[in-house]
Amino acid sequence: MNIHKQNKFVLRWLQWKNTILTALLGWIPLLPGLGLRYLFYPIIFRKMGRSVRIYPDVRLKNPQYIEIGFGTVFNKGVEIDIDHGNTVEIGDRVCLFRDVQINSTGQGNKIKLDNLVCLDSGIIIRTHDGGQVEIGEHTYIGPYTSLVCHGKIKIGQDCRIASHTSICAHNYNIGDTTKKIREQGVNFKGITIEDDCWLGSGVRVVDGVTIAKGSVIGAGAVVTKDIPPYSIAVGVPAKVVSNRNS
């Protein structure tokens, strides 16, 4: 058997093993289900720490590429769907609320949630072809926020990001009018939100922007340019109206 056939056989075996275990155990409610999943799910994850709680109706694709730290909680309806070869690293005491979706398509993607990150209900994190998302310790992201990228999104420690925020780290190419926009691919620079920032509800952050340490962005603002440290910015497009140090 050549290497290609061996790899194909291993991948197929992993898929069957993961599918069977999650089908048998994924639906079982309350304490029996929590206990059985805690006992058997280390078989399907790359790494799974102690005191992990996985509630019913959690859907997993290719969990052999997922690492989970101590005390992490997956609430009902969480979905992690990643293609072969991509990685998801989840630190200690991370909490994923109901219906959080993490999707990673293509190759070369990496998603990392540091210790004590909290993702509230309905959040979507989606990476494509080399996309990277990194969220620092003690950061909270509010309900129904979306993080989508072909490039890189980096969010620092101790940030507070309110509900319905959109952080999108790519743009479509539009220069060739002889082609449809969907045929022209994308470009990307990346987005950085440094430590201790607070983004209000409904903020939009576009590609290529850095929001520097300690900044506050008012609800509904659209951030199209870099924001200096400890600034307060509001409006469409967002403009700095004061500095926290003053």
Image (cartoon, grey):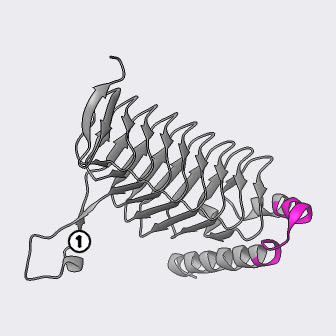
Residue found at the very far right of the displayed protein: 32
Residue 117 on image: x %, y %: 59, 43
Q: Is residue 176 above or below residue 194?
A: below
Q: Secondary structure at mark 1?
A: loop
Counting from the top left corner in percent of width and height, residue 147 is at 43, 57
* Label 1 sits on residue: 185
At 63% from the left and 44% from the top, the residue drawn is: 91
In this picture, which residue range is highlighted in magenta? 23-37
Q: Point out the image quarter for the C terminus.
A: top left
Q: Image check: 76 left or right of 121?
A: right
Q: Is residue 228 visible?
A: no
User: Quadrant where the N terminus lies?
Assistant: bottom right
Q: Main secondary structure of the magenta part?
A: helix
Q: Nearer the viewer, residue 154 or 229?
A: 229
Callout count = 1
Q: Foreground residue, 57 or 242? A: 242
Amino acid residing under circle 1: Gly
In which image quadrant can residue 225 be found?
top left
Quarter location, residue 209: top left
Q: Is 25 included in the stretch rendered in magenta?
A: yes
Q: Measured from the top left, where is residue 151 in percent x and y?
A: 33, 56
Could you tell me residue 127's position as x and y percent?
42, 62
Q: Pick the residue in front: 189 or 194.
A: 194
Q: Above or below — where is 11 with respect to 199?
A: below
Above or below, 187 against 218 in this view is below
- Which residue is at the front of the view, 72 or 212? 212
